[in-house]
Each structure stands twice: as C-alpha cells, then as structure tokens.
Amino acid sequence: MKAIVCNEFAPVEQLVYQEVPDPSAGKGQVVVDIKACGVNFPDGLLVQGLYQMKPERPFIPGSEVAGVICEVGEGVKHLKVGRRVIALCMLGGYAEKVALPASHVIPIPDAIPDDEAAALVTAHATAHHALKQRANIQPGETLVVTGAAGGTGLAAVQIGKALGAKVIAVCSTQEKLDMAKQNGADILINYTERDLKTALKEVTDGKGVDVVYECVGGDTFHACSRSMGWNGRLLVVGFAGGTIPEFPVNLALVKGYSVMGVFWGSFTQHQPQDFADNMQELIGWYLAGKVKVIVDETLPLKDAKLALNKVMGRQVKGKMALRP
C-alpha cells in the first residue's frame, strides 16, 4: 500500500510518499481501508520531533481516519468486515490502510461523509472533552475561544453553544471572525485591531471570563490569563502561535481560577469509556445539526506535505483532510 513515511525527525518537506507493507489484524484488532484522514497541527509537530510523543522511526503519521473495515482479528465480535467506521489510530493514518485496536473504532451512519467523519475525531473530540470533562462549562457562562476559525477552535465555538455558553470568538482577521460567527459565536474580537485584555474586560462588564479555550499561546495566552473571572477555568489546548508561554502562578492565586491542561490523546487512554460516550454524543449532535464539520479542503494523500504546511501556517479555516 501507499503511505506517507517519516524516516527521521525533520522538516515536513522530508516526508516520503512510498510503498509499505499492508498491515494485518492481530488479536483484538481490525484493519480499516482508509477513505479519508484528518490533518492536525500536532501531526506537523510530531514529524519534526517537537511533540510530547516521540515515536520510533520510521513511522506513518496521522491519528484520525474514516473508512471501511476490511479485516477482523481474533476475538473481535462486535465489528464486521464492510462496516463503515471512524477510528482513532494515534499513528498510521496517512496511508491506504491501518491496523488498530477494535476499542478505538466506532461505527458511523452513512449520513456522515468520509472527510467530515475523519475530521470529527480529533478537533471536535478535543473541544468536547475540554469543555465537558475539564471545564464542566455551564449554561450562561462566558467562553472565550482563541484561534476560533481553526479546526478545533470552530469545534469549541459549536460545542460551547450546544452546551449553552455565551461564546466570544478571538481571531486575527475579519474573514476568520465571520467564519466563527457563522458557527455560532456571539461576540467577535479581532486581536490585531483591539487590545485583547481591554476588549475582554469590556465585553464581560469587568467580571472576567468563566472559561477560555486557549490554543494560540504567546501574547494571546497572557492576555487571557489576565482576563479570568473568579472560579474561571483557563484551558491550555495548544500553541499554534509557536510560543509556549510561561505562566505567573500568582495570577491564579489572586484571581481564584484554575489552569487546566487538555491532552485529549491521554484522555482516550486513561478514560476510554468516557471517550466512547463522548463520541456517541458528538455523532448524535452531528446528526441533529448541533455541530458540523467544516472541511476547508481535501487533498490527495500524496500531497500531505502541502496539507501539513497549510495547517502549520494557520491558512486553514476549519479542517484539512487527505484522501488516499
């Protein structure tokens, strides 16, 4: 089969599109014939050796796929060949096939297109876990979403609205803010035109923010950290801006708020039943129209380098997908 292979940690341009052996299903596993694979910011960090996880080389990147089961391993009773599924594979998604534990495979209805199904896994599931298990956000609370036009940012806007929050979208351009508004944002802030800390104080009438879904880092994080309300929850999701900020912990002390890490990959390992329940709720919300997956572009698998560079360069509104 064809796959994108990372032979050594290096710039994205050194990824190779090549033939590799077909996978086979071991005990408790299935093999999925991949129809679409989601492209995520951490994928670009991973191949450069800049992510928390550093796999043995060579490896195939790609953590979320949609496809059809083509082989079932020993002991798997609830899944059959020909079943359409989405799957969390951690690695191996940028390929024509992938073998993975049956526990990480979820059947899906035909109403969800392949590229949207693949893109539903990481971005929406991260936002869902962050706002539900970590922040325990309540109806009527204020939610700030930074990078609100990106894949996981748009997901957080949609899910925040589904959970009853008042959503404040923070973006760098009017075009991105318009996208956030179309997905349910109540208040829009362009941080290149307004001081973010001042703007957040104004729109919350000086009370501060209840929850921040922060995936940019740098100065954006610092502005949010100084804008929290009492009993607020500052969710650390990622650093798409490239700078990992240092946090003055006295702010949490005097303002009485919590700083919470959001590492969805670890959540799926530590709380697999909660992960499965979350995915069922997300699929239900998708079918009910409460959330939707915005796929900016779907490219051929061989163009993975182009897709990754667009995602890493923050040139994507919504999600990017690959199709083998």
Image (tube, rainbow, N blue to C red):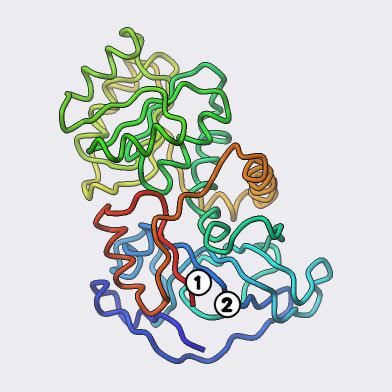
Would residue 189 appear left or right of 96 to someone viewing this image?
left
Label 1 vs 2, first from the N-terminus: 1
Residue that appears at 56% across and 72% down: 35
Q: Position of residue 175 (x, y in %)?
A: 28, 40
Q: Position of residue 166 (x, y in %)?
A: 46, 21
Label 1 Cα neighbours within 10 Å, binned few <14 / some 14-19 / many ≥20 = many
Between 215 and 65, the one lying in front of the other is: 65
Residue that appears at 23% across and 21% down: 197
Q: Which residue is mark 2?
A: 98
- Answer yes or no: do the residues labelled 1 and 2 have beta carbons within 8 Å? yes
Would residue 53 appear left or right of 313 to someone viewing this image?
right
Give the residue type at disc 1. Answer: Gly
Q: Which residue is mark 1?
A: 93
Q: Position of residue 309 (x, y in %)?
A: 27, 64
Residue that appears at 56% across and 23% down: 164
Label 2 Cα neighbours within 10 Å, binned few <14 / some 14-19 / many ≥20 = many
Residue that appears at 17% across and 24% down: 194
Would residue 174 appear left or right of 122 to someone viewing this image?
left
Q: Position of residue 1 (x, y in %)?
A: 52, 89
